[in-house]
Amino acid sequence: MIAYTSVYGNTKQAVDKLAEILKSQGCPKVVIAEMKALATEILA
């Protein structure tokens, strides 16, 4: 799991690239969690 938060979108771009690299190297499950959205769901 890659958990992140991004103010301007640059971190999301880096996370997407990291996920792509991990998948290409054979990592079977790559899950991306944007923590701001997750926190909003939990607190709602």
Image (cartoon, grey):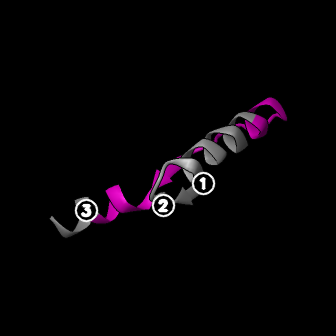
Q: What span is colored magenta in the figure? A: 21-39
Foreground tag (2 vs 1): 2
Q: Is residue 23 magenta?
A: yes
Q: Residues within 10 Å of mark 2 (few under 14, many from 20)?
A: some
Residues at marks 3 and 2, CA–CA distance in whole angstroms: 12 Å
Seen in the image, is 25 located left or right of residue 7? right
Q: Residue at x 80, y 30 (%)?
A: 24
Circle 2 residue: 5
Q: Residue at x 31, y 66 (%)?
A: 39
SS category of the residue bearing label 2: loop
Quadrant of residue 28 within the rendered picture: top right
Residues at marks 2 and 1, CA–CA distance in whole angstroms: 13 Å
Q: Residues within 10 Å of mark 1 (few under 14, many from 20)?
A: few
- The number of numbered discs placed on residues in the rendered structure image is 3
Q: Disc 3 marks which amino acid?
A: Thr
Foreground tag (3 vs 2): 2
Circle 3 residue: 40
